[in-house]
Amino acid sequence: MQKCSLCGGRVVNGRCEECGMPIPPEHTYTLRGESAHYHRVNGEDVLHRVRPTGSRPKVDDYDEEERTAHVHESGTDRHNAPRPVVRTARRAGIRTAKRTGTAAWSLITAALFLLLPALYLLLQRSTVTPVPESEEQVTEAYSNAYDDLRGTVPAAGADWDGSLTAGLYTVGQDLPEGTYTIQCAEGNTSIDLHIVSDEYGVEIYEDLSSNGYDAIDSERDDVSLPAGTVLFLSGNGTLYFHSSNAQVDALPTETAPNPLVGDAAYTLSGSDESLYLLVGEDIEPGVYDVTCTAGTGYFSFVLPMENTRTMYCSAWLYGDPDYVDTLRHITLTEDTEVTLSNYSDMDFTVTLTPSETVYVHE
């Protein structure tokens, strides 16, 4: 009885009863001088070949010992036993088909492995801006970020020097319009500087640090800041600003006391993740100094701009009995959403204190 070569099931009419796999019929043959017959063994038909007794024919150039070494375990001498031509041809055809299919898949797989890296590089080149490699290229890339602002500031002006800590500042109000050199004013400084000129459609992020902090460098030169540009500084330390063409005559000279009175403190417990506050409902609109008195987390808000754009401001704040982070001159307008996010297992407390003065506008 023929059995399935895949699952061992019984083959009936050329198909396995168990898995349904088509099975070609077995070919039987006898060698020269052999006789064959079937008999039942354990309920199955088994082919039994009978070979005549006597001496085997000699093989040229082999003695008896060498010839015996080339006889298969089944007793068939591979040098003398002829093979049926039909059976050999059919097997050769089947094997060739399998090898041809295998070779085709191998070629396809190899082609894919060769083509995929090339396609990846093409996509990467088409979607990713090349990263400058040399120091000169890095400097040029940062320099080009200010191209849209160059020529927007009058060439003539006065010298002006000032220092700014973390907070929100407006050019033409907190510092004069001009072209600046900006650098870390002291050691152990790490400041993220976010610059937005809504009028000219420019938004720039800078990272300035000194004395061991990991950043690109500690200075930016030839930074044009036209009137109306907004600067948001976050981090620790102080940035020093110097300009030789500052428009100091255009700075407002009058300030007024902040109409806001009283502090507002908000605390997130260690199990709270975020707190959302709406200006006009939870917080009174105005200008605040924001201080972290305990814990660690983020303070963020969105500042509306004139040309229907917004400026997203976010700062990491830390506070304990010996040190506190403070953001100066944070302007919170009506309907602005303020978010406090706790990033520690302890209470995160943020206090909003009215800034000392506000500018008077006509």
Image (cartoon, helix red, strand yellow):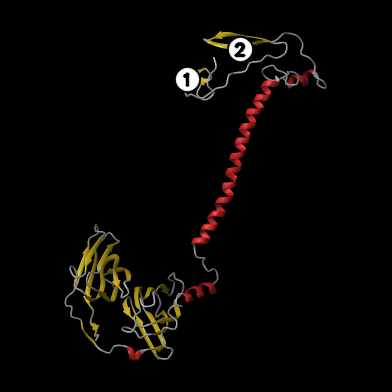
Is the residue 291 above or below the residue 78 in the image? below
- Judged left or right of residue 147, residue 236 is left
Residue type pointed to by label 2: Leu
Where residue 87 appears, x then y in whole percent?
Answer: 66, 21
Mark 1 is surrounded, within 10 Å at the Cα level, by few (under 14), some (14 to 19) or many (20 or more) other residues, namely some
Image coordinates of residue 309 in percent, x first then y, are 33, 71
Comparing 357 with 99, the one in front is 99
Q: Is residue 266 above or below residue 20?
A: below
**Residue 17, which numbered label?**
1
Left or right? Give the position of 264 relative to 37. Answer: left
The relative height of residue 42 versus residue 310 in the rendered view (above or below) is above
Q: Is residue 45 left or right of residue 246?
A: right
Label 1: state its secondary structure.
Answer: loop
Secondary structure of residue under mark 2:
strand
* Distance of label 1 from label 2 (alpha carbons): 22 Å
Front position among marks 1 and 2: 1
Number of other residues with Cα within 10 Å of mark 2, as a class: few under 14, some 14 to 19, many 20 or more: few
Numbered mark located on residue 47 in the image:
2
> Looking at the image, which residue is at 67% across and 17% down?
74
- Residue at horizontal 53%, vertical 61%? 125
**Which numbered disc flags the more N-terminal residue, 1 or 2?**
1
